[in-house]
Amino acid sequence: MTADRWSDGVADAVIPQVIDVDGVPMSGLLAEAADPRCVIVAIHGGATRAGYFDYPGHPANSLLRSASAAGYTVLALDRPGYGSSADHAETMHRPERRVDLAYGAIAGHLSGRPTGAGVFVWSHSIGCELAVRLAADDRGDRLLGLELAGTGLQHQPVAHEILGESERNAAPVGVRKLLWQPPSLYPSDVIGGTAIASSTPSFEGRAVRTWPGEVFPALAPEVRIPVHFTAGAHERVWRQDPQALSDIAALFTGAPRVAVDVMPGSGHNLSLGHSARAYHFRILSFLEQCLVARIHPDLPAL
């Protein structure tokens, strides 16, 4: 079956937006459902932009298009320091500043729009650092749930050799071997992510270095909403063996529910591969469970 045969059931309208938050222009992509069940806020990883969730030329693999067609409004943010806010990156070294900007951007982009039952946060790679900070914040209890993917607590040996002390210091050819292998998982024109590539803000080096050993273990116990964690079956950056996944789940001691999943046919970039559509609908199923729990709190735990 050719790729264009999968285009049914995806929405057409993805709108770029820029709003002002405290004097900082915050950009993103918005795909609205007419009467949304809720809003998905999607947070991209390093050296990319919001287009990670809507890669040009591949509408069937787009989270924004598939999820909005299924009844969810989707807002893919350019993280603080990316997109239109890149020129203000030097003011964002404090994580608290980035969290406030992200919450302000969510509120601004959604102002005057129906949001259904609330907001679900969906994140990838080092974007999980911001997502967990959002969830662990005092405002995080109002979120519906959290999806984390493409991250972990320990690098695989091959990744440690290539990445060294931080991803920023690694040779591009080495990073490519980690993020885009095996190439059969991805459409050929997507490998390398040229269409969504971005420069990286200077503060991200520290975020990358401190995330697995310090920030993730410290913040995860503060998360009090349902959590879903996805590991690609062909992930080469992070350990995703049963013990590693068990260790990750055990961090979330305050969450009412933690689900851990291994996605077949997926590598590090789960939303860009041939299995992206399957991955997206798998997480939408978890999101529906979060909605049931929020709307019907008296039901037995799912």
Image (cartoon, rainbow, N blue to C red):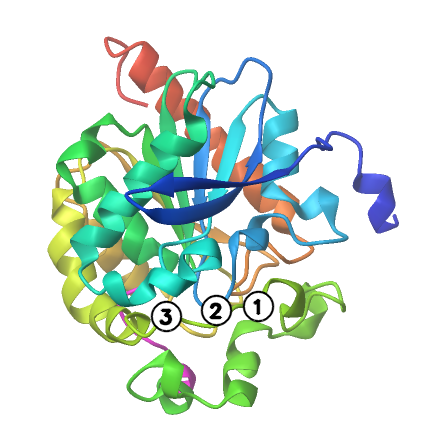
Q: Residue at x 22, y 65 (%)?
A: 93
Percent across and percent down for residue 154 are 28, 72
For the residues labelled 1 and 2, say whether their Cβ atoms are less than 8 Å apart. Answer: yes
Between the C-alphas of marks 1 and 3, the distance is 13 Å
Q: Which residue is mark 3?
A: 201
The answer to whether residue 151 shows anywhere in this view is: no
What's the magenta region? Answer: 151-159
Q: Which disc is residue 47 wearing?
A: 2
Front residue (pair 41, 292): 41
Q: Is residue 153 magenta?
A: yes
Q: Toward which corner of the image does residue 290 lie, by quadrant? A: top left
Residue 67 point in image, percent of width and height: 59, 32
- Across and down, in percent, residue 117 comes to 38, 17
Q: Amino acid at mark 2?
A: Ala
- Quadrant where the C terminus sits is top left
Q: Position of residue 301 (x, y in %)?
A: 27, 21
> Per the image, is 19 magenta?
no
Drawn side of residue 21 relative to residue 256, left or right: right
Q: Tags 1 and 3 in contact by the CB under 8 Å rule? A: no
Secondary structure category for the residue under label 3: loop
Q: Visible in this render: residue 124?
A: yes
Label 1 sits on residue? 197
**Mark sitting earlier along the chain (1/2):** 2
